[in-house]
Image (tube, rainbow, N blue to C red):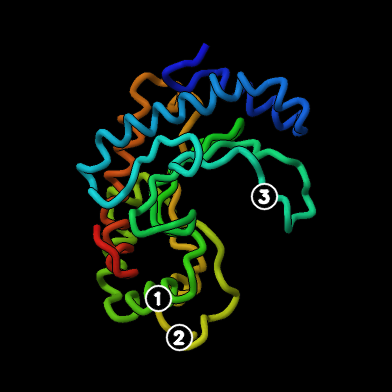
Amino acid sequence: MATARFTAETFAFLRDLADNNERDWFQANKSRYDDHVKDPALRFIVEVGEQLGAISPHFRADPRANGGSLFRIYRDTRFSKDKTPYKTHTGIQFRHEAGKDAHAPGFYLHIAPDEVFVGVGTWRPDSASLRRIRETIVDDPDRWIAVRDDTGFRAAFSLTGETLVRAPRGFDPDHPLIDDLRRKDFVASCPLTRDDLLAPDFRDAFMACCRAAAPFQRWLCSAVGVAF
């Protein structure tokens, strides 16, 4: 029977999937996926959508089972040596309305057997957007530092993602903010626990993370030229 929120069965299914990552097993256990992962995720998306507009009207909570805020459980194995067919985590992205894929600015929830976190920002932005972000840092470094080091943001989030080994082309390798300019991702994560996810008020905890990240998201949207 479908549940209204995430439960211990959510983690149990994802753990079992990691141990049995094959199509026959998944088909035999698909009702578990639907009841304990997909359906609670879609309900969560609806609940977040009821409050997300208070932070920004430009991020979308789309509860469609396909093509919405919930990422597919199926892996794209076309260009990977790893041919296991399913992801062993579930992901939800509340994407900016201007974005068409996972690289758009967004608020993100990651659920895996051994890891739960909230992510914010833009992962692997296209080259034009990445250049605009870097140029915005150079043009107004004090504003970037204020956002990056905002007390509420840093109390919850840590900047993460990959960085270049050298300075990006066209940027001074001796710039005082070169560590930030070398970023390939402008994302931050807030670690949560299993108990956080299973708590009845989890939506409120998630929304608190989103509010803490609002200044960072506002700056990022301005840098790439979309409304916040």
Residue type indicated by callout 2 = Phe
Going 31% across and 62% down the picture, which residue do you hit?
221
Residue bearing the label numbered 1: 134
Residue type pointed to by label 3: Asp
The answer to whether the residues at label 2 and label 1 have Cβ atoms under 8 Å apart is yes
The image position of residue 38, as x and y in percent, is 52, 28
First-in-chain label (2 vs 1): 1
| Dot 1: element | helix
Query: Where is the C terminus found, in terms of image quarters?
Result: bottom left
Q: As drawn, is 146 to the left or to the right of 120?
A: left
Is 157 located above or below residue 39 in the figure? below
Q: Earlier in the sequence, mark 3 or mark 1?
A: 3
Give percent across and percent down for residue 134.
40, 75
| Local crowd size for mark 1, using a 10 Å CA cut-off: few (<14), some (14–19), many (≥20) | many
* Dot label at residue 76: 3
Residue 15 image offset from top left, x and y in percent: 67, 27
Secondary structure of residue under mark 3: loop
Residue visible at 40% across and 35% down?
A: 63
For marks 3 and 2, give the one nearer the viewer: 3
Compared to 132, does 68 lie above or below? above
Q: Say which element carries label 2.
A: loop
Mark 2 is surrounded, within 10 Å at the Cα level, by few (under 14), some (14 to 19) or many (20 or more) other residues, namely some
- Residue depicted at 27% across the width and 77% down the height: 140
